């Protein structure tokens, strides 16, 4: 789309934000454009945000309106739907999860909501709580999207839609967490929030199917899909049980076959592990250094002075998901919009020498997670980057007395 058309689309989107009725704007849009690619829609919203004419949060609030107008008119970047029809392919699995999610919403979830509304009893509350906890498995689906898909959009210059979508994902997470907490601590249900979370989940399914997937097909090649397939199991799946071609084993089979055919069947073993890394205080082979870092009881992530992710450790028990697709990703894109201001301020303070470290902590069920950030500087106090160290320390908090090597 040329600049004039992008500006025209930009004007139409602005009318939505100014309060013009969606029906009126939709008629104007259809008369002007007919169909539009997902890339062009993303470019227009990106321009709105970059020009400072609108905030990510404002786009987020009207995201459903955008989807209702553009969802049916976003044409696929590639004509065929080959990858979407290939069992085990990450795109196939992702879309089939949405099918499974819709079946859950139309079936068990709707039944639990209806039963509760008809009769507020201990049994109906327990069934609704169970349904909400099942819904919370969506975190796996959203986490794969945010950590595996979004980096490829960002590398292609598509930054606004991921930020908006991540913001809505977090709204959904906050809603079902609030509903679960309320049900666990009282006899009441927040019915407005209950209706809203279902509406938001259904709307997100439409956005992923009609907007996200076409954009991904324009940004990802076969190697990118292989990387996503390799890392998906680390985050996990949901709502794909019993769906032919979409099970974890189907995903693994697709990856192994295609990785073998591409000569990339074992990423780890094909990396160079000989040779030495010499440091001022000692030396390692690459293999020793790799496994030493992966054996440490904490997750380590390093972000360079250019604000791009350079390294993360790959221990067996990770606190938060990290996938290799984030290497080279701007640190601002690694965090949801609601925490971005805090991240930017922290990095700014490190660069300016105002701070050398900062700590945050999260109580997550029985787990207590400590997250520490350190400014990395050389002997001349030149800023080299940020080291993030994340550790689950619930057992450490309960220590008392002493235990020494002397017994």
Image (spheres, rainbow, N blue to C red):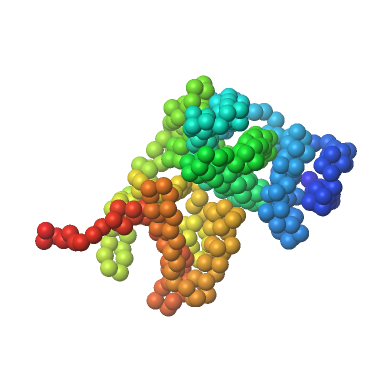
- Among the 4 quarters of the image, the one containing residue 216: top right
- Compared across the picture, whether 39 is left or right of 177 comes to right
In the rendered image, residue 359, in percent from the top left (x then y), is placed at 43, 64
Residue found 71% across the figure and 45% down from its top: 63
The part of the image, by quadrant, that contains residue 393 is bottom left
Q: Would residue 164 be seen by someone viewing this image from the given angle?
A: yes
Query: x and y percent of residue 1 in the render?
Result: 78, 45
Lateral position of residue 385 relative to residue 155, left or right: left
Specify the farthest residue to the bottom. Answer: 380
Q: Position of residue 225 (x, y in %)?
A: 53, 37
In this rendered view, identify the residue nearer to me: 338 or 189: 189
Residue 152, relative to residue 85: is it above or below?
below
Q: Is residue 186 above or below residue 354?
A: above
Residue 309, how many percent across, how many down?
A: 49, 56
- Residue drawn at (41%, 73%) of the image: 378
One can see residue 332 in this view: no
Q: Residue at x 54, y 45 (%)?
A: 178
Q: Residue at x 38, y 50 (%)?
A: 367
């Amino acid at each position: 789309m040329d600049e004039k058309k992008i500006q025209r689309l930009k004007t139409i989107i602005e009318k939505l934000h100014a309060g013009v009725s969606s029906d009126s704007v939709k008629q104007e849009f259809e008369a002007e454009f007919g169909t539009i690619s997902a890339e062009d829609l993303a470019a227009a919203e990106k321009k709105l945000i970059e020009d400072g004419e609108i905030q990510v949060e404002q786009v987020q609030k009207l995201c459903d309106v955008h989807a209702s107008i553009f969802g049916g008119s976003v044409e696929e970047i590639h004509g065929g739907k080959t990858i979407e029809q290939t069992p085990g392919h990450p795109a196939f699995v992702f879309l089939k999860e949405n099918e499974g999610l819709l079946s859950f919403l139309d079936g068990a979830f709707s039944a639990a909501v209806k039963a509760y509304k008809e009769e507020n009893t201990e049994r109906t509350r327990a069934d609704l709580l169970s349904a909400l906890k099942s819904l919370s498995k969506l975190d796996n689906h959203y986490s794969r999207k945010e950590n595996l898909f979004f980096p490829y959009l960002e590398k292609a210059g598509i930054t606004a839609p991921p930020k908006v979508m991540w913001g809505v994902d977090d709204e959904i997470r906050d809603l079902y967490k609030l509903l679960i907490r309320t049900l666990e601590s009282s006899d009441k249900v927040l019915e407005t929030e209950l209706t809203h979370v279902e509406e938001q989940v259904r709307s997100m399914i439409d956005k992923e199917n009609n907007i996200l997937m076409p954009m991904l097909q324009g940004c990802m090649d076969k190697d990118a899909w292989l990387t996503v397939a390799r890392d998906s199991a680390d985050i996990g799946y949901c709502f794909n049980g019993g769906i032919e071609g979409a099970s974890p084993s189907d995903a693994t089979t697709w990856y192994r076959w295609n990785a073998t055919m591409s000569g990339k069947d074992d990423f780890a073993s094909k990396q160079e592990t000989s040779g030495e890394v010499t440091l001022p205080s000692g030396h390692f082979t690459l293999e020793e250094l790799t496994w030493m870092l992966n054996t440490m009881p904490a997750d380590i992530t390093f972000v360079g002075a250019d604000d791009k992710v350079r390294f993360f450790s790959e221990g067996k028990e990770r606190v938060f998901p990290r996938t290799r697709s984030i290497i080279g990703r701007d640190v601002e894109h690694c965090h949801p919009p609601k925490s971005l201001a805090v991240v930017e301020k922290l990095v700014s303070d490190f660069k300016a020498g105002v701070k050398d470290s900062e700590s945050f902590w999260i109580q997550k069920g029985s787990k207590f997670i400590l997250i520490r950030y350190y400014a990395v500087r050389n002997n001349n106090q030149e800023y080299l980057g940020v080291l993030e160290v994340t550790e689950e320390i619930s057992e450490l908090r309960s220590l008392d007395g002493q235990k020494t090597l002397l017994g």
